[in-house]
Amino acid sequence: MCGFIRQFRGSFENAQILDPERQIGLAQAFWNMQGGGFPRRQAMVTPKIIAKVIEREGGKCARCGAPATEVEHIGSACNRPINLLPVCSPCNRAHLFGDPNYDRRSEVSPLYDEVALRIFVPEVVRVCDDFELWDWRAYVAERRALLIN
């Protein structure tokens, strides 16, 4: 988690947070930290292909019939239209974690609270959250030396 905190704090500090590629990378790291997934391939589906897939199904979500706004992969990470299914945002979220209310679960809330606390405070909460000063290589070398001796 501290790696994500450092990346986010550093990106925020030097305005890289405004870069769409950086946002995708941070989103991937955050979803993976939760045990889920935010596939990079999903972010690479062009708006033209998304529109084509949604139009193919008459603008409806293939799962619930609501207006489709996104696409999800059916069987693999292939971004061809034949492998994409038009879905609404709630159905896509439900598919990612198997639960549309995942982010409201009691076991997830403490993680969100801790991440918010450690990112949005003026001073770092833990030394490992400091993107400028934390030297993980030195930390690993120190731990290794302790284990060997």
Image (cartoon, rainbow, N blue to C red):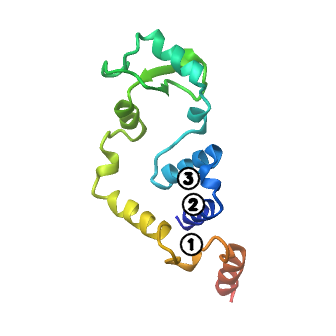
Q: Are marks 1 and 3 in contact (CB under 8 Å)?
A: no
The local crowd at label 3, few if under 14, some if 14 to 19, many if 20 or more residues have their Cα within 10 Å, is many
Q: Are marks 3 and 2 in contact (CB under 8 Å)?
A: no
Q: Earlier in the sequence, mark 3 or mark 2?
A: 2
Under mark 1, the amino acid is Asp
Q: Is residue 123 above or below residue 2?
A: below
For this rendering, which residue is in front, 102 or 74?
Answer: 102
Q: Earlier in the sequence, mark 1 or mark 2?
A: 2
Q: Measuring from the top left, give residue 123's x and y in whole percent.
A: 52, 78
Q: Measuring from the top left, give residue 98's x and y in whole percent.
A: 36, 38
Please, what secondary structure does the residue beneath circle 1 have? helix
Residue depicted at 40% across the width and 22% down the height? 68
Please, what secondary structure does the residue beneath circle 2 have? helix
Give the labeled residue for mark 3: 29
Q: Quadrant of the C terminus?
A: bottom right
Q: Measuring from the top left, give residue 121's x and y in whole percent.
A: 47, 72
Under mark 2, the amino acid is Phe
Q: Measuring from the top left, give residue 137's x and y in whole percent.
A: 72, 74
Relative to 84, 141 lies left or right:
right
Give the labeled residue for mark 2: 8
Residue depicted at 41% across the width and 24% down the height? 87
Under mark 3, the amino acid is Ala
Q: Which mark is residue 129?
A: 1
Whole-number angstrom distance, CA of label 1 to CA of label 3: 15 Å
Farthest-out residue, bottom: 149
